[in-house]
Image: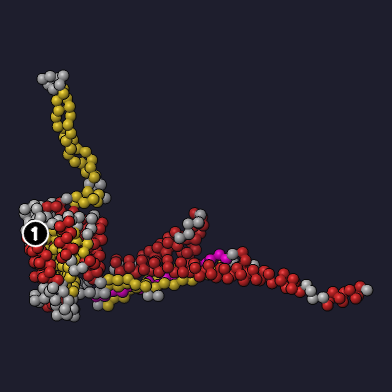
């Protein structure tokens, strides 16, 4: 009897599905977990790739800006940028977890940089690789997967393209350039100024009556940087950028002329930035006078116009097949002459010189390009400089020292045609 029952049990298949399901359930759960984790990993990889691209671009740009950044400096900058951005995107980490993640990222991330020089052009290449471990969920762990490695790679390049150019600066040294900006001097943030106040005291002849007298005293006041000092700093940044783009002084020629209500002696266009830098440094620390840019602008146009072959001959001698011509026209005021009020006559005269320059074509049909900078200028000054510029991308309206410095630096980079790009 027992033998018959045992045989029946062996032949019974009714529980197979349940047994198979019990055996396969962990595997199916693991596969489902893996599918979820892979989807999450792809999202994470896209996020990390974007952060890697931002880091390599930052390094490539910094190398081009500095010109002599070492491989160690570049790698340190790249790591700092990548790690700080990666950790900032995850606000749920505790300080301990943050420190642990930072160490993992440092150990798993490498930066390689190379620089190449050819004639007067420099190029910089940055390669970054990083492996990022993503923890997997409990279902994936069932089939033995605890983490999933994600690898990202990013390349970026930057370069100074060696653009040959001749540039002439037209700079304002009128009385308003002695006025304060809104930027406090970080070295000496305060200064003593003389102040008068009224003080009451009993009158000597009749002490029942209070008399008044002025009392002078020195009090602390904010020490703002004046416009002229701001201009000299900004011009220095421009010259540094041009020097980086042309370290051998074989591509870029620069000259300048300043003005108040009179045209000052000019600095003729010469190779490099040494002479023009000295010229700007010597501009008066306490300028005065009205505003008339017509003479200085005429000097700029005369130096650069196509029929004046001096610039072409100079570039030909350096084997520069072509070169661009730029005027950088800066003022903080409106055209007043020495009269103290806006002069339509001078305004129109300056506008006419700008139009002549913009219509002056070289053998290749290229005009003189005019960058204009209305530095904390009134409405008529802005109106003039906007009209004088070679277009919206050539007109700037800085309202403080920081913006002025950025403006001069950007103009230099645009003229010298430096750039940064992703190459992966």
Q: Position of residue 158 (x, y in %)?
A: 32, 72
Q: Which residues are magenta?
A: 120-136
**Residue at coordinates 15% horizontally, 54% vertically from top-left?**
177
Q: Is residue 336 above or below residue 368?
A: above
**Residue at coordinates 18% horizontally, 54% vertically from top-left?**
227
Asked where in the image residue 274 lies, by quadrant, the reply is bottom left
Element class at badge 1: helix
| Label 1 Cα neighbours within 10 Å, binned few <14 / some 14-19 / many ≥20 | few
Numbered label tally: 1
Asked where in the image residue 234 lies, by quadrant, the reply is bottom left
Determine if residue 354 is in view: yes
Q: Position of residue 29 (x, y in %)?
A: 64, 68
User: Image quadrant for the C terminus?
Assistant: bottom left
User: Image quadrant for the N terminus?
Assistant: bottom right
The front one of 397 and 128 is 397
Q: Is residue 251 magenta?
A: no
Q: Position of residue 383 (x, y in %)?
A: 17, 60
**Residue at coordinates 34% horizontally, 72% vertically from top-left?**
421
Q: Position of residue 58 (x, y in %)?
A: 36, 66
Say left or right for 57 vs 246: right
Q: Is residue 135 magenta?
A: yes
**Residue at coordinates 14% horizontally, 71% vertically from top-left?**
358
Q: Residue furthest right?
A: 1
Per the image, the residue denoted by label 1 is 344
Q: Is residue 217 above or below residue 365?
A: above
Determine if residue 275 is in view: no
The front one of 25 and 153 is 25
Say left or right for 231 vs 25: left
């Amino acid at each position: 009897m027992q033998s018959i029952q045992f045989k029946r049990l062996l032949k019974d298949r009714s529980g197979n599905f349940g047994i198979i399901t019990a055996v396969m359930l962990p595997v199916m759960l693991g596969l489902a977990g893996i599918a979820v984790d892979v989807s999450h990993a792809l999202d994470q990889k896209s996020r990390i790739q974007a952060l890697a691209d931002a880091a390599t671009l930052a390094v490539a740009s910094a190398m081009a800006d500095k010109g002599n950044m070492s491989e160690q400096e570049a790698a340190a900058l790249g790591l700092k940028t990548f790690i700080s951005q990666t950790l900032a995107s995850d606000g749920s980490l505790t300080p301990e977890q943050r420190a642990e993640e930072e160490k993992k990222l440092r150990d798993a991330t490498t930066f390689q940089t190379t620089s190449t020089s050819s004639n007067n052009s420099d190029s910089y290449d940055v390669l970054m690789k990083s492996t990022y471990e993503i923890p997997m969920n409990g279902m994936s762990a069932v089939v033995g997967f605890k983490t999933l490695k994600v690898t990202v790679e990013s390349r970026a390049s930057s370069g100074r393209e060696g653009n040959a150019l001749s540039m002439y600066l037209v700079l304002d040294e009128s009385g308003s350039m002695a006025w304060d900006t809104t930027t406090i001097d970080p070295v000496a943030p305060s200064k003593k100024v003389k102040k008068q106040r009224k003080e009451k005291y009993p009158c000597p002849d009749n002490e029942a009556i209070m008399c008044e007298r002025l009392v002078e005293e020195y009090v602390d006041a904010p020490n703002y940087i004046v416009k002229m000092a701001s201009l000299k700093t900004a011009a220095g940044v421009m010259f540094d950028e041009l020097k980086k783009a042309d370290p051998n002084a074989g591509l870029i020629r620069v000259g300048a002329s300043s003005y108040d209500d009179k045209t000052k002696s000019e600095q003729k266009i010469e190779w490099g930035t040494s002479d023009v830098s000295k010229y700007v440094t010597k501009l008066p620390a306490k300028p005065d006078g009205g505003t008339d840019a017509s003479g200085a602008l005429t000097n700029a146009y005369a130096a650069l116009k196509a029929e004046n072959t001096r610039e072409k001959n100079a570039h030909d001698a350096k084997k520069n097949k072509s070169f661009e011509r730029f005027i950088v026209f800066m003022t903080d005021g409106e055209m007043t002459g020495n009269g103290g009020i806006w002069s339509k006559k001078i305004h129109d005269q300056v506008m006419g010189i700008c139009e002549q320059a913009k219509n002056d074509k070289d053998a290749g049909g290229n005009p003189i390009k005019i960058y204009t900078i209305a530095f904390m200028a009134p409405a008529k000054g802005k109106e003039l400089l906007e009209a004088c510029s070679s277009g919206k991308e050539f007109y700037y309206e800085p309202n403080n020292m920081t913006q002025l410095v950025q403006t001069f630096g950007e103009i230099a980079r645009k003229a010298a045609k430096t750039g940064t790009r992703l190459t992966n």
